[in-house]
Image (tube, rainbow, N blue to C red):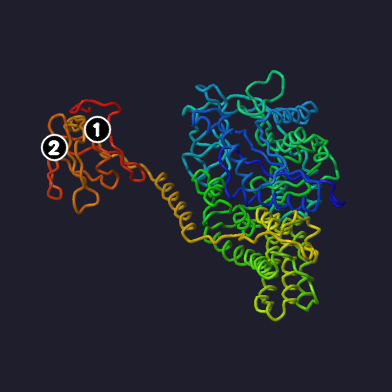
Amino acid sequence: MTKKPQRYTITSALPYANGPIHIGHLAGVYVPADIYARYLRSKGEDVLFIGGSDEHGVPITIKARKEGVSPQDIVDRYHNIIKKSFEEFGISFDVYSRTSAPVHHETASAFFKKLYDEGKFIERTSEQYYDEEAHTFLADRYITGTCPHCGYEKAYGDQCENCGTSLSPLELINPKSALSGNVPVLRETKHWYLPLDQYENFLREWILEGHKNDWKTNVYGQVKSWIDQGLKPRAVTRDLDWGVKVPVEGVEGKVLYVWFDAPIGYISASREWSQRTGKDWQPYWKSTDTKLVHFIGKDNIVFHCIIFPVMLKAEGSYILPDNVPANEFLNLENDKISTSRNWAVWLHEYLEEFPGKQDVLRYVLTANAPETKDNDFTWRDFQARNNNELLAIFGNFVNRTLVLTKKYFNSQVPPRHTLQEIDKETLDSLRTFPEKIAESIERYRFREALGEMMNLARLGNKYLTDNEPWKVFKTDPQRVETVLNISLQIVAALSVTAEPFLPFTAQKLTGMLNIEPLKWKDAGHADILSAGHSLGKPAFLFEKIEDAQVEAQVQKLLDTKKANEAAAAPVAPQKDEITYDDFMKMDIRTGTILEAEKVPKTKKLLKLKIDTGIDQRTVVSGIAEYFSPDEIVGKQVSILVNLAPRKLRGIVSQGMILMAQDKDGRLVFVSPEEKTSNGSEIK
């Protein structure tokens, strides 16, 4: 797009509603999209910023089946968590919708039906796995088996999570249904396909020639690789009950494939926004003077740069994306973020544990954004960037300026007098920052833009420090008036230029300056604040993050890693076989613990008095690290009563209580579900 856009449509990848939002999502998609939208609004542009939950697909149904609830229950739960988290974090969506909404089902059905009626799809009949016990065709994720590449025995029908190889169900060795555990059979089923191969020439001209110089190299390179390898028709329907029903008469048990229906969610969200506001949604999607920008992570590049554009092209009435500034992945403490391993910093938990510090996380994720390569988030870096940059530079400059103005001039903007060379240089430099920051944002270099915004804070900090008004006031108060006037103009400029990155901080700044929020065009002016203007009350913008706060977060991750390692630990192998007669030699009874006390000078031993039904006897048990004496008195247990007596720490132990030990070493009593009489035999 060469001419200036009349409006902007900004989409952010729809998060999958089977779990909360984590920092990888934020760094890859939502923070950069929000910076871009806020900047454009500050410039006075017409912006529609779209978000929503992706609520269809197999992982939703798998989670619902595991929890014994409906798919709708799952998406309702996580949609609400995600939506609330985004609101509290300051992601400024104009609409946040969901793909289970009626408006989406209507929109997606109509989109499919138009292409279907115009013959844009290919119909194919193929063999797919079918579970005869569950009476259903199996989606890829409902089929498990051995990976043909690495031998991993729990690979899925679409991917091996051990070696990362993409698979098809027919490649699996010894496939099984995840629903019943049975071996599935192959049955014929009919589906509709989008013939991507028929659009190769269009894609080559539109992307490889038209966007070679303005799309990010990581995006362009991945798209070129896909096209050069040759595109194939891709199924747009699948056999499933959960999703948008295929709107073809006589077709049952089929829905639109989630990759097809999810991006249409951007359009249905726009229609929802239109219904709510009364504004026409169509110019934002169908007018050539609109700039459409997709913010996504690199795992979504093929869908937004090849498949969705082909869908839009085939439909015929929609504009194509002008840019798709996809980011790479963010790691956590030098390890890949993983929802299944709980290796993540979850947004809703962060908001609870660091109240009022939304902008700190926004700052760190932007400063460390994985724009061109994978990057890493560490809690130590989080602490250092807050304490050494936000607090020591930005916050320090603002606080000193406002406190000195209150001290010397009763919180009124002082006049400016004769300018020295340092004053002129500082004001000249001030005027350049809005344009520099804007240029970086418009090129989707948000890390670079944030750096320039912080350079403006550094400019103010250095100017104030070099001029030392606290030393000059007694001898030259007019000089102090000039220095603080210029410092206050920089603070006012920061209230504008920081807003896309640090919206909560910018709001505090406008309150302290006692002004209405300014627009981008105001930021470079040297006279934003007039002499005599009354300022608000100074306050700290940022707080120091202490070592203990960071150590708690690091420990939380270490506990997660320990739990993951325990869960992955192999089950102990079977011991040598014994005969039935060997087992019958053991006399196992139910008994009740009457008394319990710690054995002196030991960590692990408890001395127990147990009513076995036969007698009352003493048993020494190594469970003191897991149970206190008080909590187990009255507990009914299983006890081996004919174990030969053994002296432990001078105490004769007459038997052994039975315990189960899980992978992480935790002990659990082997007890009857219902209370039974002491001495009942366990056979």
Image: 618 above or below 384 = above
Q: Quadrant of the C terminus?
A: top left
Amino acid at dot 1:
Gln
Describe the element under mark 1 as helix, strand or loop: strand
Tell me the distance, in whole angstroms, between the alpha carbons under discs 1 and 2.
14 Å
Pointer 1 or 2: first along the chain? 2
Going by the image, does 525 lie left or right of 495? right
Q: Which mark identifies residue 617?
A: 2
Give how far across and how far down residue 473 sits, in percent: 68, 77
Which one is nearer the viewer's eye here, 102 or 191?
102
Task: Place residue 573 in its image quadrant.
Answer: top left
Amino acid at dot 2:
Arg
Q: Say which residue label 1 marks.
A: 636
**Residue farthest to the bottom, as pictured:** 475
Give how far across and how far down residue 675 sits, in percent: 26, 26
Which one is nearer the viewer's eye here, 542 or 115?
542
